[in-house]
Amino acid sequence: LTMVGCKSNDTETFTVTFDANGGTGAPDAVTVTSGGTITAPTTEPTRDNYTFTAWYTDADATAAYDFSTAVTSDFTLYAGWTDKNAVKFMDKDGAVISADTVLFDKDTTCSVSAPTDPTADNLTFAGWYTESTFTNAVTFPVDVTASTTYYAKFTATVTFNTNGISSVDSQIVTYNTTATKPTNPTSDYYTVTWYSESSFENEVDFSTSITGNK
């Protein structure tokens, strides 16, 4: 029996390696399916008397890596370093927006202005914060005397269509967190189940993170 036109069902994967590039604490290598993306490491490497700036595709740190790029081969990312203080702005997925990084001499004060608001498909920018948990909003300009990181907050709007039974308020949800299951609209004739499409194919799992307007 001759098999014609068959192909392997194996999915091709690639490995992305991190090089501390003179520092220590490089993250572990990650494996990603061909065409997928990787997430920026949440832990930065360290180096005495230097400040980590971002991950680069070359050891000379001339080309910052875009973490939204599809991975189609094995490669290595290199830590970038500066002997200056750095004010860094992080995108919604925790990657440094390298174009907005501000460098200034140590033992000096730097007045930092807000960069251009970042954008993301199907999301709304909701300001800069001093921590990744979005507790304290930043009012620019602000004076800094040491390396500082600011985090971009994005939100999504979750709307509930009750199909004419009654009304349910929409929710503003921080990117990559969950919506709260609302109190079901009341009806004398129906019980309520929420679905993610008007064709009622997939019941809503309210433990699933929201990554865009829904």
Image (cartoon, rainbow, N blue to C red):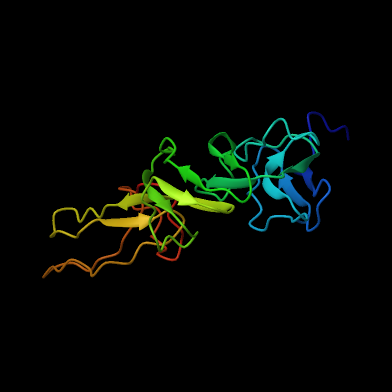
x and y percentages locating residue 199 in the rendered image: 33, 48
x and y percentages locating residue 184 in the rendered image: 22, 68
- Nearer to us in this view, 119 or 183: 119
The reply to whether residue 180 is visible in this rendering is yes
For residue 45, above or below residue 59: below
- Nearer to us in this view, 70 or 129: 129
x and y percentages locating residue 62 in the rendered image: 72, 30
For residue 149, above or below residue 97: below
For residue 165, above or below residue 58: below
Quarter of the figure with the N terminus = top right
Identified at 56% across, 34% down, the residue is 99
Question: Is residue 187 left or right of 157 when viewed as pictured?
Answer: left
Identified at 34% across, 53% down, the residue is 200
Identified at 26% across, 67% down, the residue is 182
**Residue at the extreme right:** 1
- Nearer to us in this view, 63 or 113: 113
The reply to whether residue 9 is visible in this rendering is no
Question: Is residue 100 left or right of 119 when viewed as pictured?
Answer: right
x and y percentages locating residue 202 in the rendered image: 41, 55
Question: Is residue 151 left or right of 213 when viewed as pictured?
Answer: right
